[in-house]
Image: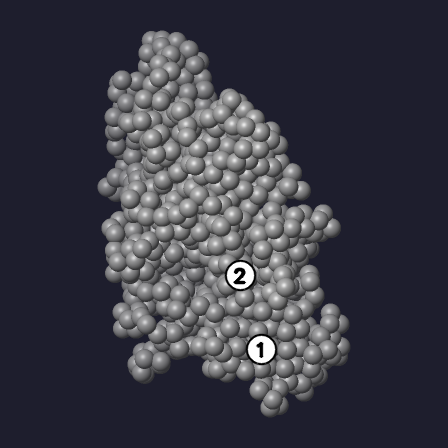
Amino acid sequence: MKCFFRKYLVIGIAFITFFGCNTQSGKKESVLNYVDTRVGTAASIADITVTEVEEPMGYVSPIVGNPSALTHWTPQTAVFTKRVITVPVPYWYDQEAIQGFRGTRYPNGAVVGDWGAMCVMPMTGEVKIGAEDRASKFSHNTEVAKPHYYAVQLDDYNIKAEFTAAAKTAFFQFTFPESNQSSILIDGVFVPGNYKVIPERNEIEGYSVIAGHFKNHFVAKFDKKFEVYNVDVLPNVVDANLVPEGFEAKYYNNDKLEGKPDVLVNYSELNYNWLKEPAKGVKADFFSVEYTGIFVARHTGEHRFELTTKDGTRMYINDEMVIDQWMYRATGTNTHKVHLIKGQKYEIRIEYYDGSSTTEMQLRCAEPVKLDPSHGPKMALKGADGNAVYVTFATKDQEKVKMKVATSLIDIAQARANMEEEFPEFDFNKAVTKSAAVWEKELNMIQVEGTEDDKAIFYTALTKCFVNPRNLNEGGRYFSPFDYKVHEGEMYTDLSIWDTFRSLHPLWVILKPQETTDIINGMLNAYKEGGWIPKWPNPWYRSIMMGTHSDAVIADAYVKGIKGFDTDLAFEAMLKNANVKGNRGFSGRVGIDYFNDIGYVPTDIFGFYGEPVARTLEFSYDDYCIAQMAKALGKDDQHDEFMKRSKRYVNVLDKETGLVRGKKLNGEWLAPYDKSISVWAQGTDHDTEVYYKNHTLLVPHDVPGLAEFMGGNEKLEAYLDEFFDNDMYYVGDEFSMHAPYLYNFIGTPWKTQKVVRDMLFKYFFNDVGGLPGNDDCGQVSSWYVFGAMGFYPACPGDPIYQICSPVLDKVSLNVGEGKTFTVIAKNNSRENMYIQSATLNGKPYSKCTLDHKDLVAGGELVFEMGAEPNKNWGI
């Protein structure tokens, strides 16, 4: 596979050369030559330790757009893909057809939702609305996948599609064949939209509604006139005309329709969006409902039902299941066609379960009535709700049609302003060059020397570190997902903080200190507007994952010198995380009242899916971070208090098994290796053991305490040896990403050097299967970037990095103010993985740690490498 992949990469290099970004007289070669954004779009080619409930997939797409763009763009091969976990990842390498080019806000590499998406598709001949119907075959041989540019040949239509993108605007160039019926279609991917065609300006404008509470606005502008246009108008909502007695809703305060219903409600139609609970007495999250009604057909013939929901749903007609989408986070519209007879009655039953965040339920029906063919075009001029909108024109052979699409969460006028700011002209080549320059600047913040393969892996990983979080700023303003108002200032979302606090945010502290300040100010704006610092915003609060690791992000930044935010407000918000139960749709630290009362989160209160042991471990670590923030602020009493709280992890460490273990409210342990401890502990007995072994190490803030539990440093060393020798470490998930660096803490740093170096070569490749697991908004990629450079932030909240064995021969980091920190590995090779000696700024250096203050001061850290460990260095 790798040989073929490198062949495809040549196409990208040729493109960069064409646009003048490659080596020229007196100019440095473009680092973009090394990047292919398809890395991670196929299953890992490595032998990965992974449980049955996960899959070693990067879950990334070939994203195009500026770093932290409001909207990224990518080819779409699927709306949803049914794999081990069903997720709306736009692009999968193993699929053979492209359905269009999606403006996406899917957090790259994560397992959450896409929101406010839209899709653009060129075609010839008859216009096909459905994503699968219109999809075109393509070959990976014709793809170019760079962070600033994507190109592919759509074989079924003989159209070459190219696009670039900035932060809020995409620029497409479609090269059409000769055709009297060439078209470009726009749809809302998961939900319908409202579309208006303005032919005198060669424009389409519109919006789609995001969870019923705000809108994704867009303006599409063409350089070619069109005379034919249409909106595929939505069918009517099923109301009292079709269901005279309405719908009865039975709500259950569980997500499985179990037991007796807790609340009964009657609706005249199913056309609702709920931000919190759907009815009084119903839980805001993880509820289920059954809707039933009698449909009376007004016509004989084919009826098309359209059911738009979030999360899992099933639909039955006369007890026959006709739609089956019983999946978490399955936002979208499902259709079913059925022949009905006029005057007959049909029982409709819809089952739905809600996971977390908002709820949507809409049922429409297209009756077998012949429509006036002029209706769609007339409605297009007025503006109408529809499944899609399209424009059609004649093209000559090899005619290039250009199209710009600007987006905004504020309004249509702001979308126009965004387009004018980013791509005011219809010059595609100029737009590509402009976008390439943005990424050149980003990636050149770190300059490296090494093998060509290592540079390709490194720069592709570094690219993924800058896709998210998502910057919502539009001209100094932002639309807040937390109070649905427009404010001045900063706001970021799609922060996978449970993952990214570990190394992605620490990388930004070094490379992007000002933007780190902006992100923290965005968190504090969310706190002011919604009542809490978000822990996984997508784009609003999501009640997923365990700890409140914004505590770690803020503390780590502050102790490393990041200023420019209200520290008193930040500390207030952190204390609220640590002491107050969640509300207003935000779960916060679930079980915090028990944690503060008895010192752990009990398993019989918070069982399966509740992750009670993980919560105890993570709350302890977050309290450690709060203690560091308190210390830096001179709050000595609170420092002492939270340092004591940070030791509560010991309450779920079990001497009998030598591992973490669930504990009930009465202090009784669960059975050893009880699978109900976590969803991730399911599967085989080996899967369960892997979970327990990884999770036991989730104590980055108190390695001496963990070693004491194990029986001393030698016992912890033996645990780690067995752990790594038997491939129990799962690099593709975050529970114990710091684990390889624990050897540094216990006097055996040469083992950290070997384990990290071995893993980087074993799991990461310049290949579509080159990521060992979900990238989670750049966390797995940033883990690689740090390891390849030779140091890692094993405990964010401490201004210290653990030294490992650099893969690259030379790394130069731009640390700001014109300063550079350089790491040089002399005599470096695959075999020479061990540090023999080191100097820092010309002086002998014998520590296996690096202080942040030394890094940002600039300087030079030089290692002499060798094939045998020097067991006297670094201890």
- Tell me the residue at 63%/82% (across/down): 862
Point out the residue furthest to the front here: 25
Q: Is residue 263 visible?
A: yes
In the depicted view, which residue is nearer to us: 461 or 281?
461
How far is mark 2 from mark 1, CA to CA? Answer: 19 Å
Q: Quadrant of residue 242?
A: top left
- The amino acid on which the numbered mark 2 sits, given as a three-letter code, is Glu
Pointers 2 and 1 in contact (C-beta within 8 Å): no
- Name the residue at 57% across, 43% down: 151
Q: Secondary structure at mark 2?
A: helix
Q: Nearer the viewer, mark 2 or mark 1?
A: 2
Element at badge 1?
A: strand
Mark sitting on residue 822: 1
With respect to residue 665, does 97 lie above or below? above
Q: Position of residue 275 (x, y in %)?
A: 29, 44
Q: Residues within 10 Å of mark 2 (few under 14, many from 20)?
A: some
Q: Residue at horizontal 46%, vertical 57%?
A: 67
Q: Which residue is mark 2?
A: 440
Mark 1 neighbour density, 10 Å: few (under 14) some (14–19) many (20 or more)? many
Q: How many marks?
A: 2
Q: Residue at x 49, y 45 (%)?
A: 428
Q: Where is residue 813? Give x, y as percent.
A: 54, 73
Q: Quadrant of the C terminus?
A: bottom right
Task: List x then y, in percent, for residue 267.
Answer: 26, 28
Q: Nearer the viewer, residue 20 or 561?
A: 20
Relative to 562, residue 284 above or below: above
Residue 458 seen anywhere in this rendered image of the structure? no
Pick the residue in front: 127 or 250: 127
Disc 2 or 1, which lies upstream in sequence? 2
Q: Amino acid at mark 1?
A: Thr
Q: Is residue 211 above or below residue 70?
A: above
Q: Does residue 7 lie above or below 654 as drawn? A: above
